[in-house]
Image: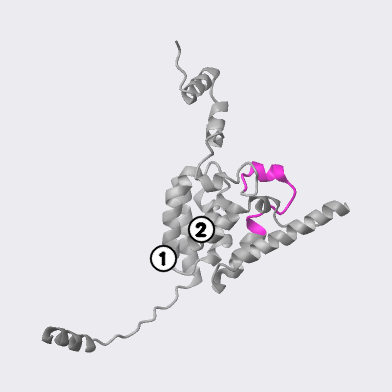
Amino acid sequence: DEGEYDGRQFLEKIVQIPIVLPQIQKNILRLSLRNVLIEVFNSCGLEGVLEAEEMLDKIAPLFETEREIIRYKNQLQFFFPTVYTEVNYSDYCILEAIKIFNHKAYNLIKENKSYMMMGLPLTYEQDDKAADVTKIVKEEYSKLVKCIVGLFPPSKQEAIKTIMTYYLPAISNNKDEDTRTKRLCSPRYFDRYFLQSSPNEVIADKLADSLTCNNISEVHDWIKGCFMYKDT
């Protein structure tokens, strides 16, 4: 076909020149990520600058392109306002960063609740039996970390290893403190990180706090509303 032949000739005349774009400097990416965090935190009435500064060292090493930061911003803007009163800001933002880079790694964390709560013990107990248990926990958690790290490209592996070793898991025996600060490693709060809200059978912290400030008649009205109770 003559038309087809002419078309091929035309395509052969197109010269394709590859253009390699320079990689954005790390300090520019860090500033961009900082602005995203400040914007998200400020939108929820938080101390945006303070919260952002605490987060940067933990997640900034993961980001290599502006596109990754935009994806992260979109995800945080959608979910963070619905859960920020129920979670630790730092743990949640780290977890969401892991999710956008590798959903399988995110699911491994979700599926290994017991190890995330026990974490990576820094010391062994004096009691022999307790020491044996601690050793097993440390070995199993190390295997989990190795598996998660292996899911990421080499450029992100060191950052993920640091996150999984020092930031997300329990690294002490102070469970009360983990609960008070709503850490991912707290049995009370772990599931809330993955439901994007409080479980149905759990009263949200924000609601519980507001109830303690109200009088008894307002509490009664709230309970009636929950059970759809009607006076007869």
Which element type, helix, strand or loop, lies under badge 1? helix
Q: CA distance from mark 2 to mark 1?
A: 15 Å
Q: Position of residue 106 (x, y in %)?
A: 55, 57
Looking at the image, which residue is at 46% across and 52% down? Answer: 76
Q: Which residue is mark 2?
A: 99
**Magenta span includes 185:** no
> In the displayed structure, would residue 15 be above or below residue 157?
below
Left or right placement of residue 48 versus residue 9 in this view: right
Residue 199 visible? The answer is: yes
Q: Position of residue 137 (x, y in %)?
A: 74, 56
Residue 122 visible? The answer is: no
Q: Which residue is mark 1?
A: 67
Left or right placement of residue 28 versus residue 160 in this view: left
Quarter of the image with the N terminus in it: bottom left
Q: Which residues are magenta?
A: 166-183
Looking at the image, which residue is at 53% across and 24% down? Answer: 214
Quarter of the image with the C terminus in it: top left
